[in-house]
Image (cartoon, rainbow, N blue to C red):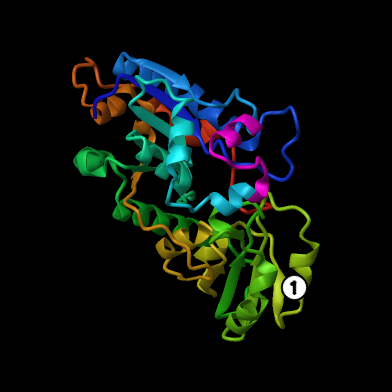
Amino acid sequence: MSCERILITGDFFRYKPDDLPGKPTFAEANICWLYDLLGPIIRRASGKKVDSFLNRFEAKERHTAVELVHTYTDWVSTYHRGMVTVGEAEAISQYIPADVTLVVGFELSPFQQALFNAINLDWISLAVSPVRFCRDYFIEFKTNRSDLLAPTLQEYAVSDKQIKDYADYCQARYRRFSKFELAPDSLLFCGQVVNDASLIIGDQMALVQNYHDKIENLAQQFDRLYYKKHPYAENLDSTLELIGRIPNSYLINADVYELMSRHEITTVAALSSSVLTEADYFDKISVRLLNNENHDPKWTMDKHILTPHFWADILGIKKLGERESLVLQDYSPISSALQVSWRYSDNIR
């Protein structure tokens, strides 16, 4: 993959309802984090100019560029758009220097990917992997140049077998001390935050209240339903009231991985939570209520993604000298850099 100039960005159309005027948006904070984390590394690997993109522009200006109104509702309604008008492609290209050939973004939306495809830009979309029970987080890697990069990515990728081995170790460790009582043949239902992009289906944000009947019908197949709230979810009164109407349902605050390690939990359900991916590694049946999964090719990367040699290999640059990097000696550099935990627990062990 050749490049002359590289832009680091993110989902610059994304808004949260609680974003404050005049303050960095949720998306801009992610862009700054990714640029600080990877900018120097990619610059060293490539010897090229690496800039951050659009995190200093006013939100209204960005959305005017693609004929959108700058609201949370518009982000939701356009998120999955795969078609781009000629006018939108021409407008967004005005903000990108002509010598830019590669965009590296945090959680690029399908609409953004379509925009970059329309103006013939190579792109790489990075996200925190849904597998979060290991000692360090992983990074999920997607690109529109999988035809070119697949062999290199496969060399670095963490395999399903490696992840399954660690899940088996986790189960053994948790079962050693987990003693609280659970009903046999139970269902674990995992909550989510209301602005989770994985909840977008069509042009709307799914709400758990609209799936009450499906949840109740599913719960009837089990001795008990345990509801595990998302650690960052707020204003849960309506959700808890909904769950409370289901017979034999209980709110539980144990570590989600401890729960999935227990034999009594046989099935894990959610609208679209990343825990569903993890449940498969814990030998649980997973039930996804939203039919909006993306099946584009993707690879799971470990801390090597934080090294210049990884990016030199991605960019086709071979001569960097010594391959060892001090970051590889850090036990969990990705999670340390991110400083976010999704362990779903009020009593993490």
Give the structural element (helix, strand or loop) at label 1.
helix
Residue 141 horizontal side relative to residue 268, left or right: left
Residue at 67 percent of width and 55 percent of height: 194
Q: Position of residue 210 (x, y in %)?
A: 67, 72
Q: Which residues are magenta?
A: 60-73
- Asked whether residue 163 is in view, the answer is yes
Q: Quadrant of residue 121?
A: top left
- Residue 63: say if magenta: yes
Q: Nearer the viewer, residue 100 or 200?
A: 100
Q: Nearer the viewer, residue 187 or 82?
A: 82
Residue at 33 percent of width and 26 percent of height: 101
Q: Quadrant of residue 311?
A: top left
Q: Nearer the viewer, residue 223 or 143?
A: 143
Disc 1: which residue: 242
Residue 117 horizontal side relative to residue 198, left or right: left
Q: Position of residue 33 (x, y in %)?
A: 54, 28
Where 148 falls versus 225 (above or below)? above
Where 193 falls versus 239 (above or below)? above
Q: Position of residue 334 (x, y in %)?
A: 47, 34
Q: Position of residue 23 (x, y in %)?
A: 72, 28
- Residue 159: say if magenta: no
Where 226 falls versus 147 (above or below)? below
